[in-house]
Image (cartoon, grey):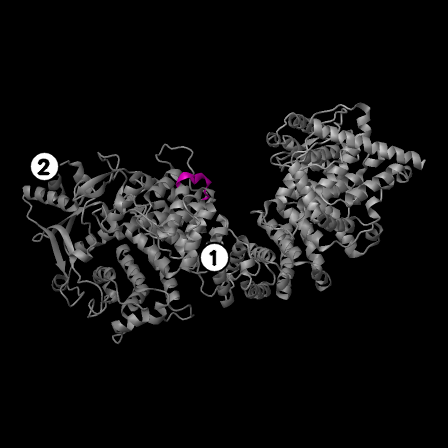
Amino acid sequence: ILYIYMMMFFLHSFIALSVAYWNKQCLGTSFLGTAQAFVSPISSTVRRGANNRNESFENGYGKLQVAMVNSQSDESNIQRDRNQGRGRIQGRNIRTNERARHGNKSTYKMSKKKGKNYKNSKQLMEAKAINKEVINSESAQDVLEIFMAKGGAKGEAGGGVFNSVNYSTLLHRLARFATYIDYTQNRNNPANSVDQKRKVILSDPRTAILLASLAEALVQPKSNKMLVFNNRELANLGWAIAKLKIAPPSNVYPIVRPIDSNEMETNSQNKHVIHATMEDIENDLLDLARKVRLQVLEVAKERSSISDPAERALVKSKWIPMLSALSGKLLDVIAAKVLEILDNFNSQELANLLYANANAGRADEYLFGKLSDQLVYNMKKVADLSPVGNSRGLTLPKPQEFSNSVWAFASAGVRCQGQVNLIQCVAETLDRNDGEIVKEFKPQELSNTAWGVATLISKRGSETEDDDNTVEDQSALRILRWVAKSLNGRVNDFKPQEISNSVWAFATLGFGATTSANQLNTNNDYISLPSNQLDQDRELVAQSLQTIAINASSRLHRFRPQELNNLAWGFCRLGHHSDDMRLLFEGIGQQIVQRHYQFAPQDIGTTLWSFATVEYFDESVYKAAASELTLRKSRSFKPQELSNTVWALATAGATPQTQAFDTTLVKQSQRSYNDPITECFAAATTELIRRPNEFKEQEIKDVLWSLSKAGIRHPRAFKRVAEYLVGSTTESENVRGLNGFSPQGLGNLAWSYARQGQLAGGIEESVIGSTGRLAVYETISLDVGEDLIQRLFTRIGETIVLCGAARFKPQDLSNTCWAFATLGLLHKDFFGTVAKVVNERLKSFNPSNKSDTSLVKFKAQEIANLVWSFATLNYKGGDLLHSFTPYIIYLCSDGKKSTEYDVKTISQSFKRQEVASIAWSCAVLEQYPPQLMTLLYTALFGSSDRTTPQSLKDIYSDDGIQTQAVMTMFYVQMALDIEAPELALSLPSTFPDDWKESNDSVITIDSIQDEDDTSMLHLTTSRLQQNVSRALQRIGFNHVQEHIISTTELQEGHGIYLSPEHLEFLSIDIADTSKLIGIEVDGPGHFVTVLDSDSKNVCDDTKGSAMRTGKGKTGWKFTANSEQQMNGPTALKGRLLRHMGWSIVHIPYWKWRDLKGNEEAEEDYTKRLL
């Protein structure tokens, strides 16, 4: 018998070598009949290259020999690698892991269902031999060669040669080799990368045949005992397919689940899950396997017909898309089979299945719910050491199984009850025996668990609070506490990525964040889990961050850019500031300077955002980071990355070329830039203009806010955004609208537009000739358009009224009101809503109640801007100033129970400019709360005659009262003397000389009067006034122009003392001094436009436009079609003049313009006025 076997072996070898030689020489296809079935296992052992090979395999549905040519270069490469021992080292390392994974006995332990006959059969012995050979393989090529050599391509399901264990081991080993990293080799060599290894394996036709064969094996009838896959084999197969990364995600290739009422109900909202009978699913799997085989065959034929190796190499592996679909279907079938025998799975196998489906993007609520329920059941049984658990042979899960399971849920984004139970079970396991098991967790496992928990909760969204959320939140906190303690105890063991992920997890859930950090980030929709031991958590996290800051600072060069980004963001979000944190940020900044070219767009944007938020400003760091955001690279940046970057630059006070984009006020020759900061703004605005639909509302407002904050005027960007949000005309459709903006977003949006107009005052050699308020109106109209800016602010007012101003913080209300007033736009419903909300808040404010939120607490600047806005627009707002009085006294008394205050306590909250602004608002609105007025005068001039101007300068740390405030107080004092003399308040006897800023120029009417020097119409203000004057002369009205009222005249004629000096501070445009008749020629700067009024002015001009105003200057011709209301400054001036006995007549600019220079019409109009 031995002799016969030896003769058969030699004959077998001779035939195999002959066939291999013949195939290689002829480069063709041979039909070998029945002999080929015998020799193909041997002939297929000839070494093959990685890309183009002579593959000898049989189609599962015919005995066709396809010859694919060996690549000599690939053959030599494989041989050289083996000579150097690399293949053996790699194989030995993986083989060791494989044996540890399977064990000597459990690998071939067959289910009792396979039967005693099969267990003792020759087939089993052969299967064991194949398995041993696969485990001892030294490369992926060896695995595939073994598969082919043993007859893997002979027929359907491997021709009955392989059993279920063989398939599991083959695919598992293949995946191991695909993901193996050889650290002894150069990792910068692309050939050594995991992606390249995976690509080589997947482009090999033998891999396609192996997966097709596996598909056929999975659907074999249960009567085939060789191919009954047990729990371990199914888990290994799922893990391996996921590792190969060829299965398509469910949004590309839908998941197919067997029809089941419970499953269909669970996945009813998942549009990526479809249902079919198990028979149909298996038939689809077989059909895909057949198509893969046929496509491999077609490519083999095409390659074998080409003699030139270079041309043959260009033939693509066209079966890859079909192989991808087959892999996805394989995972679906494996999942279905898993659910049939779910009770048999241990925790490791369940964790692997969760990982596999998450990694492949083929997870759904039903499957993950079932797997996690079984996993939690197993864990609890083991923990309880119950007979049920022991009888099933369960063992305590390893730390990696905990972390992988949580990671799988987080990566898949699946939420179900099983996930909540899993997190709770993990927390209970860590807590058991005072955290004894935590010591067994590797740092990577701890950080992955923390990352997974944080990711899961962050994806939970704004669901209604329920018991499940509370359980999940508290379990997450318990897990994070153990991670924080581990960081404190063994931070040296944590790698950079593990430190980074842990800090990121803390920050994402607000674990241990300071109160100030939570308040600072309320507009970012950050999560802050409620803790029942908040102080202890903060102390624990502060200690952990301190430990990390000290430890990480010395090895920041080992952190990847993304890890540095997470580290900076985490520290910023948690708000625990210290000297060590400052040193850490300095170190991160130096890493940016040294290797900014390595930072991805997201890393640049978020890191700079973190720096700016913690007020770490190093110009070299910001410039280095900004240099990566260029016009050439801008398309690769996401909107959030763009907005974060420019926001950080603006917050840090970076200095760009502010006139680079000002196409309205600056000549083209002066618009240039050559610095990275300005180019960074150019890139962000270019992308906002090009693709505004990709920007979220917060990102839009951040870019616009950054421009205005940095002092950069950009008319094109602001006009484009306005058109995008509300439409270029009233008939525009499909506009973005403002409903998606947060309260802060609306406030900042409005502020940004108003600030663009206000920045006109700082432009040298501006093409606009007007100044003051009129310059702002003209500028914003030239930038955006009169109609468009009014439509935008109308929508802002309507949106706030509709959603309710109650959600707005004081700063949001203040910014929005200030913007309306600065642009001269009044939305009565909006301001009425604001007045109501503010009055209600102030009346309910209780200084002793610490639970009062930030919705009540106004800062001094917010109060000043808010009341200034109401006064400027001449909108009363009810008893707004009376409501503010107790609150302002509270602020100035430093929150004490008593209401006592002095200049020092006032200066801790208010600046003198803010105090003067509030006093002026009182005069305009005719509200003089006695306690408030007394406090304001004390703040400005002290509480006794012993107070000197110099002492107040020392207290306020300023140089005196600004000129604008000096003039403001003249008006206020006049109003008080006339309208509230009972308060007995007066200006100091030496006012204003000793009190004003020392660098102020001499006060004259030209420098202090808030009048418009030029008109925004086709006539300048002076020309308009001259035309009116000539018309009055023609009708015999005796008058003078620019009649001046001085402080001396006020004191002598009206008993109003303002100053010992003779100062000219009040004028009347046209005056008959004998009859005390004054005519005020009011241009656009004297009015506000009422946006929500039903009444309209009837004007000939229906559309505003730019116009020349003389001397090469530009202005704007306003329409004045909407209702025009006299603004606060003009109303106050007229009221004071009337108190002095003057009869004041107002000539609005649009009415005079409508006369069109017709002298007869002008004379008739002036006669009627007089």
Q: Is 813 part of what is drawn in magenta?
A: no
Image quadrant in which the C terminus is located: top left
The total of numbered circles placed on residues is: 2
Tell me the SS state at disc 2: helix
The amino acid marked with disc number 2 is Glu
Sequence-first tag of 1 and 2: 1
Look at mark 1 in the image and give the residue it sits on. 594
Q: Determine which quarter of the picture holds residue 236.
A: top right
Is 964 displayed left or right of 638 in the figure? left
State yes or no: discs 1 and 2 in contact (Cβ < 8 Å): no
Q: Tell me the distance, in whole angstroms, between the alpha carbons under discs 1 and 2.
A: 75 Å
Q: Residues within 10 Å of mark 2 (few under 14, many from 20)?
A: some
For the record, the magenta segment spans 689-696
Please tell me the numbered disc located at residue 1159.
Answer: 2
Which residue extends farthest bottom? 946
What secondary structure is the magenta-colored segment mainly?
Answer: helix
